Amino acid sequence: MRASGRRRAGGGTVDLILLKSAIRAVTLAGVRPRRGTALPDRARVLLLRHDRIGDALLSTCFLDALARHRPGWKVDLLLGRDNLRVLDGRAEIGRRWCYDRRALNTFRLARALRAERYDLAIDLMNHPSLTSSVFMRLMRPRLSAGFHEERRGFPFDIPVPAQPRSTVHIVKRLGELLRALGCPAPDDELRLRFEPTAAARARARAVLEPLRAGGARLCGVNTSAGALDRFWGAENYRAFLLGAARRFPGQRFVVFAVPAEMDRAARIADRVSGAVLAPPTGSFDEFAATIEGMDSVLTPDTSVVHLCAAFGIPEVVLYADENKALVWAPWGVEHRALIARRGMESIPASEAVDAWSELVR
């Protein structure tokens, strides 16, 4: 639920922070945590994860831990338009609800969720979310749990203190939430997991096996960053491909891009020895299966980072700042982080070649 404002005549502005604070205050009025709340062994549970693809992938460790430690819980998910299809292959998930941010649909959704009479709603958002707070208030689960910050009030019956968002990895924070829910899962047992369908894997094998002729290994190079300020620059990508190809002549390079950026990717790969464009895919599942076929990956900070972590693929990740490299680093997989000094294009291609070479030797 995003509030938006515009500049008024006379120079006045709508203070979005104040507006959100007012909505939060009304939403949380009278809400207090229930200390010592007993959690049922059998329950209908809703997880709120209505943000991005990468966040949904990170939440797979949470789903696995619930399945191990709370087998009597039947789990549904509230997802967003961007990540609705990401977890389709998870058999332990029941219904998937979609929050599309349109006002009328939001109230219809809240009414439908309230009719489900969930025993427990768990907010997996990385920070206290206004949207989640409103949903919790409108749907009225018997119990609620999630991260909280003292200055924002107590929107949950089981509030878990939010660890610093600037220094603590999101998986570690999810581990704290799990332990508050009676799931004794240490951090070293938390693993990301994604399973493409058999059909998607068969399609990827058919495309990638010819590239492995003669024992060649495959390096995926993701050129799509999702935002202009995270794009590394066409010249940097091309310099990386040329330098890596010279250093390891037996490698093949599979260059990935979203359909709208495929022409640019073609120019980046043009006349680079061993470089080919990744085949177009019709779904996230097919895209994931193609990534799974890589032996190493170079990517900016996108959902590909967490997809590679789920597959155990070593990766070089390009970050816009040090904070991102700490909090959103690949979890549980060998990697090298390269951090921009003055915008993404300031990361030298030679440093990326060196970092990638360390991983593939």
Image (spheres, rainbow, N blue to C red):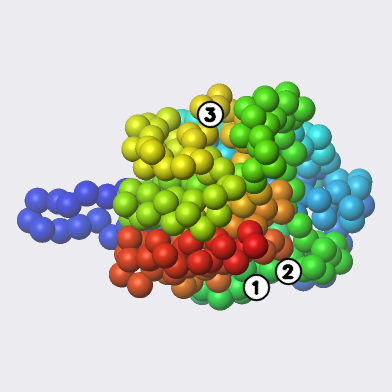
Q: For the residue labelled by badge 2, is the local secondary structure a helix, a strand or a loop? A: helix
Using the rendered view, name the quadrant where residue 123 is placed.
Answer: bottom right
Q: For the residue labelled by badge 3, is the local secondary structure a helix, a strand or a loop? A: loop
Nearer the observer, disc 1 or disc 3?
Answer: 3
Structural distance between the alpha carbons of marks 3 and 2: 40 Å
Q: Which residue is mark 2?
A: 176
Q: Which mark is residue 161?
A: 1
Say left or right for 182 vs 260. Answer: right
> What type is the residue that disc 1 sits on?
Pro
Residue drawn where x is 76% and y is 57% of the image: 191
Badge 1 or badge 3: first in the primary sequence: 1
Structural distance between the alpha carbons of marks 2 and 1: 9 Å
> Is residue 280 positioned above or below 217 on the image?
above
Badge 3 or badge 2: first in the primary sequence: 2
Say left or right for 266 vs 254. Answer: left
Residue drawn where x is 60% and y is 66% of the image: 358
- Badge 2, how many Cα within 10 Å: few under 14, some, many 20+? many
Q: Is residue 353 visible?
A: yes
Residue drawn where x is 32% and y is 52% of the image: 235
Location of the C terminus by quadrant is: bottom right
Structural distance between the alpha carbons of marks 1 and 3: 44 Å
Looking at the picture, tell me which residue is in the foreground, 221 or 126. 221
Percent position (x, y) of residue 196?
72, 34
